[in-house]
């Protein structure tokens, strides 16, 4: 009888153990998300699509979709919290995710972006700022569409920012306006940023003529060091006096830039543009990916957000290119802008500028558009942060 009781106890313990394993708790939704995670990793490694983003996010999706039992303990009847999942209080992943939920990581990313960015291109040709501004049409187009589909105004604002092609800004705004959609918005923003080389070229070819694609732009003028130092100071004062709610992002962006351009804080600039931004990118990508648990992520709303994200990128590309075409009507011959750089108004730096370069070289192998495209590209970074501040000011 004692042997029978012992074996019964062992069998019961095996049952408890099996109840804890992910094999028992695995669902079709987990399988779908794991496939998406593997797809991200494949695109990053095989196709070279934004590997610094897609590998952390893709691996995070794998981590987040290893099912963890989240019910009552089989024997004691106590609520179960293994403190390992990203949504389980006290877990390491939950602590790391704090930086996403509370909008801490995005400003740190912007600090690094500022320390990496050379704003000479827009200082040498200020009208390119307008191209970056025009591309923000994607944000407000997606916002209006989301409202029409029945999303609440704050949710529509968070979804619309995907059109800025700026992952940190999308995370920052979503954490404030629609935290319930944070994972879907972040994954959508970063996915489409990585897919810029596939999404934008067909739109660019559709909207431009062969003659327009061959336009040669004047070489940018040399920008003085004084101009470079003054730009982040006046840029901060101008943008943040207009949109104070954009201060966390814009303040850090311009601070990082003055660290770079001042010439006397090289160590700080190198730290911000190197180790700091790398560490934060790892933490942000991994935790955003891990937040996409199938039970939380796979909803009708998430699919709608993905569709709206694609539409917003197309609208943004359309806005930038069409603005250049209209603007060219008022410019003299020799001062016209090649509309192929209109796509670079989205702030996927430098991916969208590289698309402009690649498309331009297809029609004229000596017409290098990269430096010109970087103008609207970096203007788009500022524009998306300003747009986020505008949305936050009247929707929060």
Image: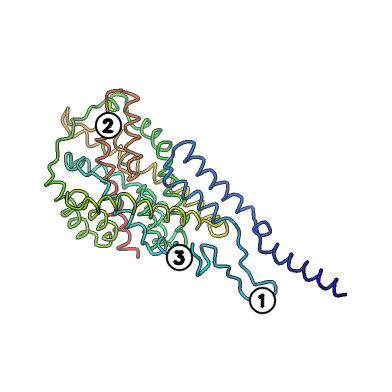
The foreground one among 28 and 163 is 28
| Dot 1 and dot 3 residues touching (CB under 8 Å) | no
**Based on the displayed image, in which of its 4 quarters is residue 125 positioned?**
top left
Element type where label 2 sits in the image: loop
Residue 140: x %, y % from top left: 34, 51
Does the image show residue 196?
Answer: yes
**Mark closer to the observer (2, 1):** 1
Residue indicated by mark 1? 77
Which one is earlier in the sequence, the residue at label 2 or at label 1? 1
Residue drawn at (23%, 33%), measured in percent from left and top? 337
* Numbered circle sitting on residue 201: none
CA distance for labels 2 and 1? 66 Å
| Total number of numbered discs in the rendering | 3
Residue indicated by mark 2? 369
Residue indicated by mark 3? 95
Element type where label 1 sits in the image: loop
**Based on the displayed image, in which of its 4 quarters is residue 211 positioned?**
top left
């Amino acid at each position: 009888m004692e042997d029978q009781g012992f074996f019964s106890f062992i069998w019961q313990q095996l049952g408890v153990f099996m109840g804890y394993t992910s094999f028992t708790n695995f669902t079709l939704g987990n399988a779908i998300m794991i496939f998406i995670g593997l797809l991200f990793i494949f695109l990053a490694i095989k196709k070279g699509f934004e590997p610094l983003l897609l590998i952390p996010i893709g691996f995070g999706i794998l981590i987040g979709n290893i099912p963890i039992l989240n019910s009552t303990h089989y024997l004691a009847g106590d609520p179960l919290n293994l403190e390992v999942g990203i949504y389980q209080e006290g877990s390491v992943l939950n602590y790391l995710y704090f930086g996403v939920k509370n909008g801490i990581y995005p400003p740190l990313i912007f600090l690094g972006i500022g320390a990496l960015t050379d704003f000479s291109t827009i200082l040498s040709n200020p009208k390119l700022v307008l191209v970056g501004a025009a591309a923000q049409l994607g944000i407000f187009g997606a916002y209006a569409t989301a409202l029409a589909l029945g999303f609440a105004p704050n949710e529509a604002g968070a979804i619309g920012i995907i059109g800025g092609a700026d992952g940190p800004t999308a995370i920052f705004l979503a954490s404030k306006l629609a935290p319930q959609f944070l994972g879907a918005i972040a994954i959508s923003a970063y996915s489409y940023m990585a897919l810029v080389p596939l999404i934008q070229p067909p739109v660019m070819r559709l909207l431009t003529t062969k003659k327009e694609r061959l336009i040669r732009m004047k070489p940018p003028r040399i920008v003085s060091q004084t101009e470079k130092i003054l730009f982040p100071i006046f840029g901060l004062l101008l943008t943040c006096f207009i949109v104070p709610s954009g201060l966390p992002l814009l303040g850090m962006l311009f601070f990082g830039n003055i660290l770079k351009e001042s010439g006397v804080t090289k160590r700080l600039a190198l730290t911000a543009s190197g180790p700091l931004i790398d560490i934060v990118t790892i933490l942000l990508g991994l935790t955003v990916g891990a937040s996409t648990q199938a039970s939380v992520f796979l909803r009708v709303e998430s699919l709608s957000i993905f569709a709206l994200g694609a539409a917003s990128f197309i609208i943004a590309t359309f806005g930038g290119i069409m603005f250049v075409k209209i603007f060219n009507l008022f410019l003299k011959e020799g001062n016209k802008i090649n509309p192929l750089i209109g796509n670079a108004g989205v702030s996927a730096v430098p991916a969208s500028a590289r698309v402009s370069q690649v498309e331009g070289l297809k029609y004229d192998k000596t017409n290098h558009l990269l430096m010109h495209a970087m103008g609207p590209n970096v203007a788009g970074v500022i524009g998306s942060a300003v747009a986020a501040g505008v949305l936050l000011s009247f929707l929060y």
